[in-house]
Amino acid sequence: GRALELFIDGAHNMDGVRAFNAWLAPHRPEHILFGAMSDKPLSDMVSALRETHDVPITGVLIQNARAASAEQLTGALGPGGAIARLSAALDALPSSVSRVAVCGSLYLVGELYSELGLTAESLLTRSRDESQVR
């Protein structure tokens, strides 16, 4: 029920995380939600996020058979790293937080869009006369 400024990127590999970090830094996120597939360099990705942003990172369990498990996310985030499904992670954000980065997997981005009630059609950009989709 509250407004959040969301910074969203798949950032599903180290190059993606580096590019997202560079773009995201001036926007100063206050929290990061991170979820990825199990075959990704989770610890390196989390380390790169932490090096650029001194904010809490919550691990998100993506609903996909290839997704990183709670144990893998805990290993990357360290002891005390919060792990939750996306809806619970969003609900658990402190009320003082308004700028949130979501990254680590295109599957996570898809879950976020679904959670927000967004459809592919609502994300399309149409030309001025709306006869062509870009």
Image (cartoon, grey):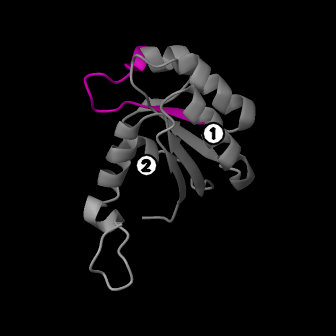
Q: Residue at x 35, y 74 (%)?
A: 126
Mark 1 or mark 2, earlier in chain: 1
Picture quarter with the N terminus: bottom left
Which of labels 1 and 2 is toward the front?
A: 1
The percent position of residue 58, horizontal first and vertical second, equals 52, 34
* Residue at (52, 13) in percent of width and height: 75
The secondary element bearing badge 1 is classed as helix
Image: 57 above or below 91? above
Query: Residue 67: within the magenta?
Result: yes
Q: Position of residue 98 (x, y in %)?
A: 59, 58
Q: CA distance from mark 1 to mark 2?
A: 28 Å
Residue occupying the point 61% across, 42% down: 20
Residue 53 in which image quadrant: top right
Nearest to the observer: residue 133 or residue 122? 133
- Foreground residue, 47 or 39? 39
Which one is in front, 44 or 78? 44
Q: Which residues are magenta?
A: 57-71
Establish if 22 lies above or below 118. Answer: above
Residue 54 makes an appearance in the image: no
Q: Answer left or right for 21 relative to 113.
A: right
Q: Amino acid at mark 2?
A: Asp
